[in-house]
Image (cartoon, grey):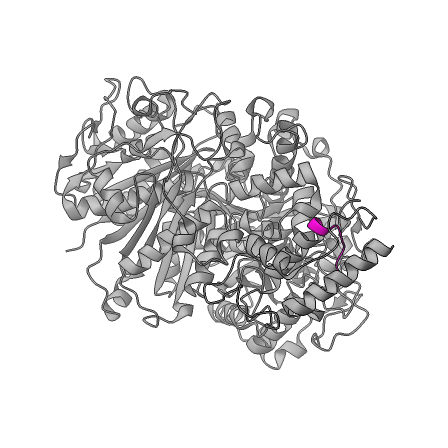
Amino acid sequence: MSARTLVTGIGVAAPSGLGVEDFWAATRIGKNAIGPVTRFDASSYPSRLAGEIHGFEPAEHLPGRLVPQTDRVTQLALVATDCAFEDAGLDPGDLHPCDMGVVTAAGSGGSEFGENELRKLWSQGPKHVSAYQSFAWFYAVNTGQIAVRNDLRGPTGVLVGDQAGGLDALAQARRRLRKGSRLIAAGGFDASICSLGWAAHLAAGDLSVSEVPERAYLPFDAAASGYVPGEGGALIILEDEEGAVARGARDAYAEFAGYGATLDPRPGSGREPGLRRAVLAALADAGCHPAEVDVVFADGAGVPRLDREEAEAITAVFGPLGVPVTAPKTTTGRIGAGGAPVDVVSAVLSMREGLIPPTTNVELSPAYDIDLVAVRPRTASVRTALVLARGRGGFNSAVVLRALD
Amino acid sequence: MKGPHVSKQEFTFDDLKRILLEGAGADEEVDLDGDILDTDFESLGYESLALLETGSRIEREFDITLDDDIFADHTTPRSLVEAINASLKVTVDA
Amino acid sequence: MGRRVVITGIGVLAPGGIGVSEFWDLLSSGRTATREITHFDASPFRSRVAAEADFLPELHGLTDQEIRRMDRAAQFGVVAAREAVADSGIELAGLDPYRTGVSMGTGVGAVSSLDKAYRAATDHGRLAAVDHMRAPADLYDHFVPGSFATEVAWAVGAEGPATVVSTGCTSGIDSVAHAVDLIREGSADVMVTGATDAPITPLTLACFDAIKATTSLNDDPARASRPFDATRRGFVLGEGAAVFVLEELESARRRGATPYAEIAGYASRSSAFHMTGLRPDGRELAEAITVALDEAHLNPSDLDYVNAHGSGTRQNDAHETAAYKLALGPYAHRTPVSSVKSMIGHSLGSVGSIEIAASVLAMRHHLVPPTANLRTRDPQCDLDYVPLVAREHRTDAVLTVGSGFGGFQSAMVLARPDRRTA
């Protein structure tokens, strides 16, 4: 139980960069990646901005046999996983397949694939539905395809908790390591920029209707008016310290040190939202005092009520202006199940460089007593980072990452 | 589903290649334009799932119903093309 | 030895029986709940039979607003959760809500609501894109089924860790195992956990038609699900939910609860082979079984009953039989094995939890439910599958397994708490 869980590899597919290098080059300076929707004709919808990954050609990265049977979300997940394994310096044969597993968070599954099959079903009839629909859309598809492609025969997992699920998946990966696995590929992915997905986001009611990419998603800003959906996610290679040392892994990025999760009470209960308790649970799990935390990667809903809840929870734990807070997802939009793993990537890179990436485009509302790293990056020694994620339905998750000595 | 109004009356090897590519892609190690008429589908990289997808695309495009066992009984492109043409003929004659 | 986790309450909603008592009546009688599909016109489909639940939400305490808001599967989950909490006798309102968590499994989430919403918002497929003005207000909660956990948490007043587990057809086992982990590690004291699915919908039927995974035996619906039988032709879709209350053994005893069973061991593995195909030798499923038994400190000889996945596809039943032989050795032949899917069909993600319920009830009644419709022996399936008639049999330890698309293989060991040597 005492063995530490280490982040030994990272792979990312985000609107701001496919691959860690491009992603961090954009994120560290807050380069905006939100723009007009191009993946489907959004002209008839009230919201028309998204964080899309441009220039991704699946056939350049994946076998020809795999492409027709996979949704975009799976293609992105497989490519990010390839990058993460490469980054971890893992060669085939380093570990036994049964000692390696995979846990991912899903949001809407292979929704674009699913929408196409629904269209065929209702416009042409049941015989037109693809054989691949039996798995290309379901929530477990990324875990399954990652396991098949990388021959990971150990424990598996798939969690759904909207935006919070991405952190829950990393925590489940740590449990698997504590039960004896040597390596777990963990992360989360979402890609719901299709007409069905768009209708779903619109139904939820918090989608920004701004036409200006730089003004559409402004968490903690007095002008906050909703969010912009993004696509992609990140894959994190987690290993137990002993095993990583034994296989001669190169320097790990950080320790996955603590985790906590709660669910908000039923609306109208008058009880406090659960985020503060999730943060306290994660800090306690990490054996970490709030004063040790150098940066908070906020969930940054971009919806005034939720921004206020988050700012209040952060202030309650850390005190007014008690810790630098940032939301680099302002460059990409909210990536659902992929959002929090992308923030974990940002957090470990921020430790490595000693730089907190900015909350781009945002001017902090005077209503919040938080030290927001807005507009410009901030140089800082980052030894301990807290990553927060909240999902629709009341999910709150918090993760503590700690630099290694 | 069977009826006199079939859209096409012959199923060619090129039809098969096209439908395989559309529905299941191609293995990088395999050249579909090579001499593969008598190569097993399995050696061409097409497992049962890919063949099920291929079969249902053929059924839709040529308006025929294939036996459940067609790919078990016909494991190469040549044999499959012949079998499908035989069943197209039955459909037209009917 | 860490915290031991026990089941203290059960709720079941299954084809042929709403509530634990009707469910057990069906299983112990060997009757089947498979029939011609009535939920919609299934005549254009290859497979036209399913095991449907006769569920009228208004009769089970759901308000009009809840019925409008929730997908059918979410409704199943909430009804089963309420039954489980009532059955356990636990007063959740008196406990710290942050110490009660929820883990709900589902294979295909709110697929029937998505299917309906798509139809409504595209004018039955006539529009190429979804018209958001015609989409239901709760579409996002159907699109991302985390809402299933939220609904159950709201119904029981839980504010601790909550999630949906969605590992396809092993979701119902993996979800409960996740809840066990949370209690063992101290993240929660009580977990309300199980799984729910309502997949009998045109989209699901069509995609299983396309790979010929569902049965083509439409002529005799009551005998369409034939696990381990030589004439089996694929699985029969089902629907339903099972939910449990889990507690740490000592605290359950302190409040005077009588545990049904301890969840003593679990493991999941991936076959990492193919999204729908299985290696014939069953190696990864066998390894999951072996690891689950080890965690339970039990030997194959200790098992009194194996509650099989037994989906009734040609591939699965042979694969699973091979895995039992590999993992249990000679005891594969000496232990009764049965598939309740012969009676209640295969409800994808939720069936694993329904089968945990069946396993626990087998322990309570010392009665092994049968494999219905098993009349013709298959040389590849040569174990004792308890054909047709339930069997009285001392049952103190049960293995239940699941196997599904994506390569997921899971095994769970349930045991009478006082049976285990600590």
- Image coordinates of residue C64 in percent, x first then y, are 66, 25
Q: What is the residue that sits farthest to the bottom in this orientation?
A: C330
In the rendering, at what x and y percent does residue C169 appear?
A: 59, 55
The answer to whether one can see residue A367 in this image is yes
Residue range of the region highlighted in magenta in the rendering: B60-69
The tally of labels here is: 0
Residue A146 placement (x, y as % from top left): 44, 57
Q: Main secondary structure of the magenta part?
A: loop
Q: Quadrant of residue A261?
A: top left
A230 is within the stretch colored magenta: no
Left or right of A102? Residue C205 is right
Q: Nearer the viewer, residue A150 or A345?
A: A150
Residue C238 makes an appearance in the image:
no
Q: In the image, is C122 to the left or to the right of A346?
A: right
The residue drawn where x is 78% and y is 68% is C387
C354 up-or-down from C75: above or below? below
Tell me what residue is drawn at x 71 percent, y 56 percent: C214
Q: Verify whether residue B67 appears in magenta.
A: yes
Q: Position of residue C290 (x, y in %)?
A: 51, 72
Quadrant in which the N terminus of chain C appears: bottom left
- Answer left or right for A283 relative to C243: left
Quick check: B57 above or below C100?
below
Question: B25 or C264, which lies in front?
Answer: B25
